[in-house]
Image: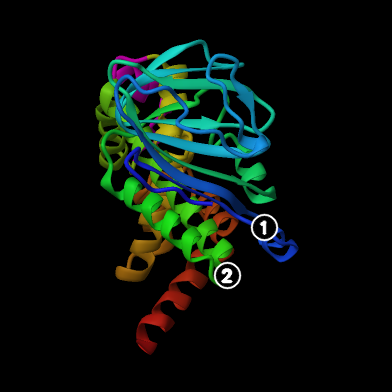
């Protein structure tokens, strides 16, 4: 069902079949509504599974992303005390969790939302890509995200064959965009990014040494526990692992692009012995250093 009119309301509830469920992620609803100042919220009643009384809150059986493109309001849930939200914020709703939200009477707001479920998203949540402890994400005014919502509404309206699979792809795109933008904004606001970028520069400049992460944190005048946690959030690697990856990448480049011996490469990258370098390289690549050189040069000759 879709309603578009003077109130600025558009939504679609989708039928999901067994084949759609086998895909691993499916969309139940997608919509948009613009709430003018002074207007009661929500604008109208929805089917029983989506009934929403902002005074009492509700519990959904699905995940939802709710993006506020304009205006201000409040949000609260079992895991989040009442917080003020405004344009550029995105709320993540979880199945089985009580929550409520509403625009301020004096400002109203514009919201986009999409509801979905499936074992694929369950796995992402289990791995903490999105968490109940951080349900409000700072996205800012993002035209790419609103375009994705608009496209999802259009696809849902058309309701053509395999539209659920198309919508699933849009949901993944949204989640990837939301994670990337919100994480980077978090680092920018707290100036964490500059510290991590400094650390990466120091690692690159000291690739021939055995730089210890604790010493690096000291150089940056920050605690090691904080540095290790933030570095991993920012890069996906613990500092020591990232430094290993730099050495490995440099070793590959030297093996392919230079005539240096394995012993010379091992020494230039600060390994304690050629034997240790040999074991390290084989463990991480599956090749011996000379085997990798032969393989790489063979590929280059074919090209």
Residue at x-position 66% and y-position 44%: 123
Tell me residue 19's x, y (percent): 71, 66
Task: Name the foreground residue: 294 vs 31.
Answer: 31
Task: Name the foreground residue: 246 vs 119.
Answer: 119
Whether residue 213 is visible to the viewer of this picture, yes or no, is yes
Q: Is residue 101 magenta?
A: no
**Residue named by callout 1:** 16
**Residue named by callout 2:** 162
Q: Secondary structure at mark 1?
A: loop
Tell me residue 276's x, y (percent): 54, 49
Residue 199 to residue 151: above or below = above
Residue 269 to residue 20: above or below = above
Using residue 151 as the reference point, say whether residue 282 is left or right of it. right
Tell me residue 39's x, y (percent): 36, 23
Mark positioned earlier in the residue sequence (2 or 1) = 1
The quarter in which the C terminus is drawn is bottom left
Q: How many angstroms separate mark 2 from mark 1 (CA)?
A: 11 Å
- Please tell me in which quadrant of the rendered image residue 69 appears: top left
Q: How is the image coloured?
A: rainbow
Residue at x-position 38% and y-position 66%: 255
Residue at x-position 35% and y-position 46%: 145
Using residue 88 as the reference point, say whether residue 94 is left or right of it. right
Tell me residue 10's x, y (percent): 42, 46
Packing grade of label 1 (10 A; few <14, some 14-19, many >=20) is few
Q: What number is the disc on residue 253?
A: none
Residue 10 to residue 281: above or below = above
Which portion, as a residue range, is magenta? 209-222
Q: Secondary structure at mark 2?
A: loop
Whether residue 288 is visible to the viewer of this picture, yes or no, is no
């Amino acid at each position: 069902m879709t309603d578009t009119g003077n109130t600025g309301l558009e939504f679609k509830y989708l039928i999901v079949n067994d084949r759609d469920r086998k895909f691993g992620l499916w969309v139940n609803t997608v919509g948009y509504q613009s709430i003018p100042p002074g207007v009661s919220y929500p604008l109208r009643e929805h089917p029983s599974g989506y009934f929403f009384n902002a005074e009492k809150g509700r519990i959904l059986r699905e995940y939802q992303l709710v993006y506020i493109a304009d205006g201000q309001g409040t949000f609260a849930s079992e895991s989040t005390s009442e917080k003020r939200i405004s344009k550029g914020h995105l709320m993540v709703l979880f199945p089985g969790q009580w929550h409520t939200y509403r625009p301020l009477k004096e400002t109203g707001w514009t919201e986009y939302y999409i509801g979905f479920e499936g074992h694929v998203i369950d796995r992402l949540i289990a791995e903490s890509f999105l968490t109940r402890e951080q349900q409000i994400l700072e996205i800012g005014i993002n035209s790419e995200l609103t375009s994705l919502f608009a496209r999802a509404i259009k696809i849902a309206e058309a309701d053509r064959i395999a539209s659920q699979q198309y919508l699933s792809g849009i949901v993944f795109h949204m989640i990837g965009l939301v994670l990337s933008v919100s994480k980077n904004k978090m680092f920018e606001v707290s100036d964490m990014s500059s510290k991590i970028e400094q650390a990466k520069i120091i690692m690159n400049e000291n690739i021939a040494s055995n730089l210890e992460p604790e010493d690096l944190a000291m150089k940056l005048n920050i605690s090691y526990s904080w540095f290790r946690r933030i570095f991993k959030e920012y890069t996906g690697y613990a500092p020591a692992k990232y430094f290993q990856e730099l050495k490995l990448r440099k070793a590959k480049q030297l093996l392919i692009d230079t005539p240096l011996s394995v012993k010379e490469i091992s020494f230039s990258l600060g390994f304690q012995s050629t034997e240790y370098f040999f074991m390290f390289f084989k463990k991480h690549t599956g090749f011996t250093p000379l085997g990798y050189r032969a393989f790489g040069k063979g590929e280059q000759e074919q090209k």
